[in-house]
Amino acid sequence: MKILTFVVAVLLSVFSTCVMSYVSMAIPIGPWIAPTLALLAITIFMIFYRYKNNISQEIALATVAGSVGGILATALGFYFTTLYFLDETVFNAWMASPKSFIFVVAGLSVTAGMFGMWVANMFEHKFIVKDRLSFPIGELVHKTVSAYKQTRKSIELLVGFLLNTVFCFFRDGLGKFSGMITSSVTLLPKMTFSIFTIPAIRLDFWPMLWALGFVTGHVVAVPLTVGVISKVLLARPLYTLAFSDLSWMEYIITFCSGMVLSTAIFGLVKTPKSLLKSAKELFSRGFSRKESKTQDTKQSFFKKINILETSILLVIFVGFLTYFKFSILSQIYLFIFAFICTYQIAVIAGKIGLAPMGKFATFVMVPAIFLFPMQDAQLKNIQIVLIAAFIGICGGVAADILFGRKIAHLSNISISKVKFYQYVGLIVSSICAGAVFWFLIDHFQLGSDQLFAIRAQNRWMLINTLKNATTFNYYVLLLGAIFGFILSKAKVSPLLVLGGLFMPVNITLGLVIGGVGALFVENKQEMYPFWSGVYAAGSIWMLVRAVF
């Protein structure tokens, strides 16, 4: 069974990396993939060990290994791809050499991922045993795994996966077989009434978008709808009345940059409070605790292991950053703030089940733009993106690792065993992430309808605004900032609204349809397995199309 567990762990790591690589570039939100992986693991183990008892631990180990790839791919899609919009020349130079691209992605993933793992190892006992944080995703997966003999949900996931795979095949075709189903239908042509312009509304037969909208529900549907309406009733009329001397693209990018800037400013104002609280807690309590003599012996042993892990991490950390010519001061800066931010992200994930990587990535990235000036503009762009991506990856991985440790704690799995499988997941996903991203980007192109990468574009607009503020129309920038402030006060995510403003209407419509559909279901959690299978199949299908 151990061989099967290892094989399934590797397969799920590759699977989650593939799925979330596409999802992170297709939509502005990254749902946790661990529950889906748990259902897949249950299905596989039930096939091979149908009449065996007590296989829940094997299912849990394979799941926690695979989930690392999901959060890693999400962070890469949100932050690393920013470089394409910031400096297309450098990004395309890496893309021209697949080995170079894969090397950079793998190096970043291993370095930041090990940092996140290191922080999780250090505070695991405090968070899970002492503070008893719930880590909701860990509890959810534990409940799913514990009920592994209830195969109905696994069957629903497979049905969703197979149905969407068949549908995609007949829609798009493959190889010599051409599609037989139309891919879209125009519901409403473009219309203009005075200063108001209603864009053409096209419904794409894209079940994956419906699935993602269903799973995320009103969290995505409401702000995206607000974004589309704002584009018709606010952004376009303002452009027609006062800013028609600018090109539409120049205007909308500036307006959205104002929204991103105001969101970043308020995030920067609030974030230091939580980080200062974390820093005080760290230094006031310290890392030691009273133990008995027997426990002291064990503690000294684990200290040796921690010293070894820390030494390896420092070598990799310094080596990777030195390769990209980070100064010693900038390396110290990144290490300190990555540590504090990762700790805080883990605390938040432990309490509410979400890992807010974006605001912490912004908090560390923005000062670095001004603190570490460089003559080489291209190298500066690379470093800015790597800083944001590093914070996103190490924070996300730390949260995911602790979700896995929570599962281990609830399932009575030894920490050494679960740590081994999590390292397997990190290494496997780091190696394959570069290849997956390269295939998807090479085939579909970043910024296209399939890979719009709105999160990366948000960060590009922020960086571009900070670096080139004098080139923007200040009135448009101010209007965007005011609009973003109003949305924040109304408790509507400005960055998701920006998706509705900036993304193609057909993509927004697909997500909204799924979100609205969830409102008419009494217990939508019961349908999560089916829709999880649908969106997993859609992501894998895009990769299949890229390869073949």
Image (spheres, rainbow, N blue to C red):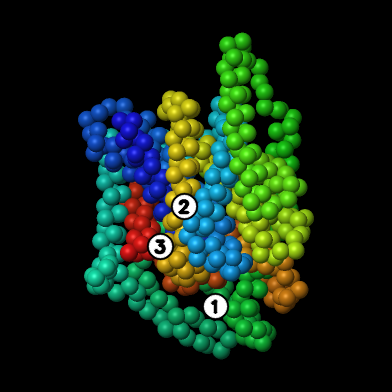
Which residue carries the number 2 mark? 433
Type of residue at label 2? Ala
Instruction: Please tell me whether residue 463 is drawn above or below residue 533 in the rendered image.
Output: below
Image coordinates of residue 129 in percent, x first then y, are 56, 26
Q: Answer yes or no: is residue 224 visible.
A: no
Image coordinates of residue 174 in percent, x first then y, are 27, 67
Which residue carries the number 3 mark? 209
Label 1 SS:
helix
Type of residue at label 1? Val
The image quadrant where one finds the C terminus is bottom left
Q: Earlier in the sequence, mark 3 or mark 2?
A: 3
Type of residue at label 3? Leu
Q: Could you tell me which residue is drawn at 57 percent across and 50 percent down? A: 108
Image coordinates of residue 302 in percent, x first then y, are 58, 23
Q: Nearer the viewer, mark 3 or mark 1?
A: 3
- Tell me, yes or no, whether the two marked residues, 3 and 1, touch with CB atoms within 8 Å: no
Q: Nearer the viewer, residue 370 or 321?
A: 321
Measure the alpha-carbon separation of dots 2 and 1. 38 Å
Label 2 SS:
helix
Measure the alpha-carbon separation of dots 3 and 1. 23 Å
Image coordinates of residue 415 in percent, x first then y, are 48, 27
